[in-house]
Image: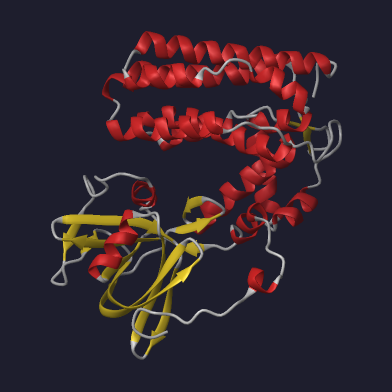
Amino acid sequence: MTGNSVTTVAYGADLGLPVVDEAVFRNVVGHFASGVTVITTADGEDLFGTTVSAVSSLSSDPPMMLICLNRSSVTHDAVRRTGRYAINILSAVQGEVARVFARKGDDKFAGVDHTVTEHGLPLLGDTLASIECVVEETAAGGTHTIFIGRVVSATARDGEPLAYYRGTFGKLEQALETAAYEGTRDWVLRRRTRLHETIDVVEVAAALRLDPTLINNALIRLATESLVNTTEGGAYEPTPMTPALVENLYGARVTIEVGVLESYLASVSDEQIGSIVRLADELLAARPATAEELDGFLDRNLDFHAAIVDIAGSRQLTASYRALNVSTVWRETYQPDDWQRQAGPSFIPRITQAIIERDLPTALAAVRAQVEFVTQGAMQILSEHGGRI
């Protein structure tokens, strides 16, 4: 590579070699724990920033750093225009900063402590380290551009880094615990251990590539959520999905969502509404016809409703809402014809329009109607499977 150009050579798919499935790739790469950074730059008075984990030191003589930015990002375009960027290495307590800069929006710096350096680059406060770079080379890589920068300034302080592991920000230990909980929960709900059989902690740990102690702790938490039962010998087995459990889970979800709308709909920001509208559009565009497509549809549905809960600004409340999701069970029982029958009328446009108009009565009615419809559909499926899944 020289200047801002790169010589291309045919590799991989160009030579007829197989390309790994995207879902498989994401899952495997998710097992790599990495630090978390926010890449920032300035173009005149406009500040830009985005959360990135694809950052690496490239050379010490001369000092050079490599970052990868998605070409759909406005920060990418600003770095390309200005030819400079700063790497803000986040500390373990800056998970919320990572989330703020991971979202779309123009006011990411609002309320975030930052300064502008003599090199004209915005640096975030309380970071573990900061590195300022001038772009010397670029290269294309799939959906991203690789920016190679010469380091012009670097500072660091003592502390613990923020880790990113399998979709979770936090201290590495906390990230591992979250990964164990989510992976074990998915294992249970997918009935990879059948009803009335003991969950093999070692087997789950091996499948998730995590320590058995983390899996055992996850099972303790799942027991408090009534998703596993403790046997007389102190082991765990999956809890059957029953009408009573369905009523409790969906009842708790509607209570949270309705409570958030009642408290926060009047003050919801345009940016939050924009996020909800985008998720609604993605959800409405999905037409699940296969098990894989159903996975994506149900995930988008959860993201849509979680975005509504997220307007409360409480990570713990949103996490609690997500923890009540049991759609994985329905993934394992729905047949294509069943799913088309259960899909029924779409409540999403009604909910979305009510939120746009900040129409609380209509929003509450639509949310309650959708949960009631979904609950009845779940009850029908339970009935078709003998009342227990």
* Looking at the image, residue 2 lies above or below residue 15: below
Is residue 131 left or right of 56 when viewed as pictured? left
* Residue 151 point in image, percent of width and height: 29, 79
Decide if residue 151 is on the left or right side of residue 36. Answer: left
Near-viewer residue (231 or 258)? 258
- Quadrant housing residue 337: top right
Across the whole image, how many numbered discs are drawn on residues?
Answer: 0
* Colour option used: secondary structure
Q: Nearer the viewer, residue 211 or 255?
A: 255
Q: Is residue 76 left or right of residue 175?
A: left
Give the camera-side residue of 256 and 13. 13
**Quarter of the picture holding the C terminus:** top right
Q: Please state the horizontal and vertical placement of residue 303, each as a whole percent of the image.
A: 51, 34
Q: Quadrant of residue 13?
A: bottom right
Res 162 seen here: yes
Rendered-image quadrant of the N terminus: bottom left
In the rendered image of this protein, does residue 28 appear above or below residue 365? below
Residue at 13% x, 71% y is 118
The residue at the point 49 percent across, 15 percent down is 367
Q: Is residue 245 visible?
A: no
Residue 157: x percent and y percent?
Answer: 30, 70
Q: Position of residue 119 (x, y in %)?
A: 16, 72
The residue positioned 83% from the left and 32% from the top of the image is: 232
**Residue at x 61% of width, y 38% of height:** 296
| Rendered position, 132 above or below 339 | below
Q: Residue furthest bottom?
A: 61
Front residue (pair 382, 207):
382
